[in-house]
Amino acid sequence: MVRCADDSLYSGITTDLKRRIEEHNSTGKKGAKYLRAKKPVKLVYSKKFKDRNSALVREAEIKKLPKPQKERLIEGK
């Protein structure tokens, strides 16, 4: 999960976290369209999963959470 310059939170999955953050913060078109006007983004939460399906399931769960619950997840509570 990344925190955008406007304090919004964005969740996604990737196989290369460092590369993906760089893409989101770059001027190219590889970053998420949603983030283009919200740069820079900063990594605030990540978790590794054994397979893509597990990561997709957790991403869907996180996207459904209201922002206060996402903030608690980031804080580790």
Image (cartoon, grey):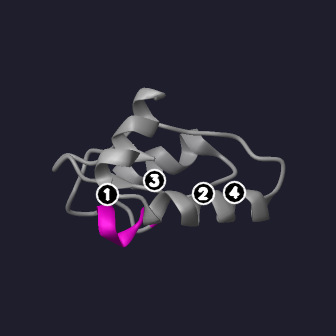
Task: Evaluate if marks 4 and 1 touch, with contact meaning CB atoms under 8 Å apart.
Answer: no
Which residue lies under the disc numbered 3? 23
From mark 3 to mark 2, how far is it between C-alphas?
13 Å
Residue 35 drawn above or below residue 39: below
Foreground disc of the pair 2, 4: 4
Q: Left or right? Give the position of 11 relative to 16.
A: left
From mark 3 to mark 1, how far is it between C-alphas?
8 Å
Residue 34 shown in magenta: yes
> Which of the marked residues, 2 or 1, is nearer the chain's N terminus?
2
> Which of the marked residues, 3 or 2, is nearer the chain's N terminus?
2
From mark 3 to mark 4, how far is it between C-alphas?
20 Å
Q: Position of residue 65 (x, y in %)?
A: 42, 59
Which residues are drawn in magenta? 30-35
Q: SS of the residue at dot 3?
A: helix
Q: SS of the residue at dot 1?
A: loop
Which residue is depicted at the point 60% across and 57% down? 13
Which residue lies under the disc numbered 4? 55
Foreground disc of the pair 3, 4: 4
Farthest residue, direction top: 76
| Three-letter amino acid code of the residue under disc 2 | Ile
Task: Evaluate if marks 2 and 4 touch, with contact meaning CB atoms under 8 Å apart.
Answer: yes
Task: Evaluate if marks 3 and 4 touch, with contact meaning CB atoms under 8 Å apart.
Answer: no
Which residue lies under the disc numbered 1? 27
